[in-house]
Image (spheres, rainbow, N blue to C red):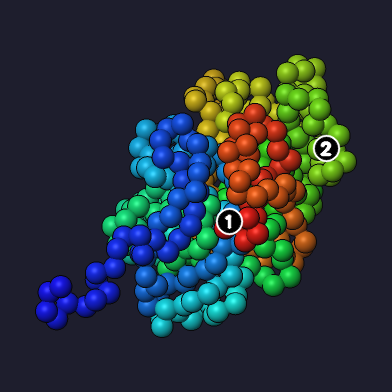
């Protein structure tokens, strides 16, 4: 031992492994228990005990290295909710015991025009993702399939006390991903008409928001089996089988807005034909390509727009709105030990409509 050396520096790496999670070790994406270290709580940080984490398709894509840049071991999960266990000395918005959420990013430059506007997803230097990003201490960020997380307070959200934590989790990606373009394009005007393509985690939230805003909502799907759910469970006004040319033709020039939540490749011209003049089609899914005839836009003054999650300001507004209007995602609660099966079922579109991992009661 070096004279004057703090004995705490002699602790082993194993002693520093203060967090338990589930991680993928390679592009097979298979998840298994993994111990690692979270950074110490800084003056502006919030440390939260994770109670629940939603399962997003991003968890599939990153654990299986679909993008080609995954850094292993990789702990996924960016729909995180929990209870504050410690706060830094500068933290003003949170205290021990508060219910909080963390979404798809945990840092940004905090200096550019987008950060100044609370739109950190568009940060000019790039937002730092909740998992597989680079944290302030230079380590790789690790997500919510874990026992706790340390995050700068700016990127934490108040979960209203009357809103169940297990139901809040999917709002932090699926919910905000459709909320953001709906706000941007003024889709909250009662009496307007909305088309929703796809009825998964994102699509079912678009239907719920649309109905809450007083819109007439039409769901488009390739699966007739979803008709009863769309109309009777989620409250959509209309259901169209997108492969039925007659049904699609009857809808022409009837919609003010369309949100495409599907990532499958679809023909865009038939959908653009459904929009009224000046109508907007928003992409939040990731098809491999987008093809349409220029006349489909030009002749009707129509627009195609893209959107991805949302900034801190809108995320908090959405959480308060959902609590005030009792808007809840439809979920299936599973233990962490079921995570691999959940990801497989998600790939096979076998979930109604969002898996949520019960971290508190299963991660031991």
Q: How many marks?
A: 2
* Secondary structure type for disc 1: loop
Q: Which residue is mark 2?
A: 229
Mark 1 vs 2, N-terminal side: 2
Q: Looking at the rendering, in which quadrant would you find the C terminus?
A: bottom right
Say if residue 226 shows up in the picture.
Answer: yes
Picture coordinates of residue 111, whole percent (x, y): 33, 64
Question: Residue 141 vs residue 263: left or right?
Answer: left
* Mark 2 surroundings: few (<14), some (14-19) or many (≥20) residues within 10 A: some
Question: Residue 87 vs residue 40: left or right?
Answer: right
Q: Please state which of residues 339 and 248 is positioned toward the viewer in this rendering.
A: 339
Q: Please state which of residues 343 and 206 is positioned toward the viewer in this rendering.
A: 343
Picture coordinates of residue 308, whole percent (x, y): 51, 46
Q: Residue at x 49, y 76 (%)?
A: 86
Q: Residue at x 55, y 73 (%)?
A: 84
User: Residue lying furthest front in this view?
Assistant: 1
Question: Would you identify the image quadrant in which residue 317 lies?
Answer: bottom right
Q: Please state which of residues 193 and 262 is positioned toward the viewer in this rendering.
A: 262
The residues bearing labels 1 and 2 have C-alpha atoms spaced at a distance of: 32 Å
User: Residue lying furthest top in this view?
Assistant: 245
Q: Are marks 1 and 2 in contact (CB under 8 Å)?
A: no
Say if residue 175 shows up in the picture.
Answer: no
Question: Residue 140 vs residue 187: left or right?
Answer: left
- Tell me, for residue 363, which label it has, or none: 1
- Up/down of 360 relative to 60, above or below: below
Q: Residue at x 59, y 43 (%)?
A: 339
Picture coordinates of residue 64, whole percent (x, y): 46, 34
- Up/down of 22 relative to 315, above or below: above
Q: Looking at the rendering, in which quadrant would you find the N terminus?
A: bottom left
Picture coordinates of residue 196, whole percent (x, y): 70, 37
């Amino acid at each position: 031992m070096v004279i004057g050396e703090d004995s705490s520096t002699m602790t082993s790496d194993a002693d520093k492994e203060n967090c338990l999670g589930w991680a993928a070790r390679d592009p097979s994406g298979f998840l298994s228990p993994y111990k690692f270290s979270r950074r110490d709580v800084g003056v502006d940080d919030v440390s939260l005990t994770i109670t629940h984490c939603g399962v997003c398709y991003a968890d599939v894509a990153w654990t299986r290295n679909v993008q080609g840049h995954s850094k292993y071991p990789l702990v996924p999960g960016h729909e995180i909710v929990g209870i504050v266990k410690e706060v830094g000395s500068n933290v003003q918005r949170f205290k021990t015991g508060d219910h909080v959420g963390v979404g798809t990013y945990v840092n940004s430059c905090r200096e550019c025009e987008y950060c100044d506007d609370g739109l950190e997803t568009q940060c000019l230097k790039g937002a730092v993702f909740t998992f597989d990003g680079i944290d302030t201490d230079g380590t790789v960020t690790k997500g919510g399939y874990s026992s706790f997380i340390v995050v700068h307070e700016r990127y934490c959200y108040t979960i209203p006390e009357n809103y169940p934590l297990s139901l809040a989790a999917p709002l932090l990606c699926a919910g905000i991903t459709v909320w953001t373009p709906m706000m941007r394009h003024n889709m909250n005007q009662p009496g307007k008409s909305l088309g929703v393509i796809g009825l998964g985690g994102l699509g079912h939230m678009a239907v719920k928001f649309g109905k809450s805003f007083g819109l007439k909502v039409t769901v488009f799907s390739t699966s007739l089996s979803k008709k009863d759910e769309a109309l009777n469970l989620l409250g959509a006004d209309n259901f169209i089988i997108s492969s039925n040319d007659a049904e699609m033709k009857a809808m022409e020039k009837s919609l003010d807005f369309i949100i495409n939540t599907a990532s499958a490749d679809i023909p865009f011209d038939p959908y653009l034909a459904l929009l009224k003049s000046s109508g907007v089609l928003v992409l939040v899914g990731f098809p491999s390509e987008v093809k349409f005839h220029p006349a489909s836009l030009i002749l009707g003054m129509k627009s195609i727009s893209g959107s991805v999650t949302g900034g801190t300001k809108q995320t908090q507004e959405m959480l308060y709105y959902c609590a005030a209007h009792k808007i809840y995602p439809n979920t299936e609660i599973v233990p962490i030990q079921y995570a691999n099966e959940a990801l497989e079922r998600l790939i096979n579109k076998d979930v109604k409509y969002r898996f949520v991992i019960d971290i508190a009661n299963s991660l031991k």
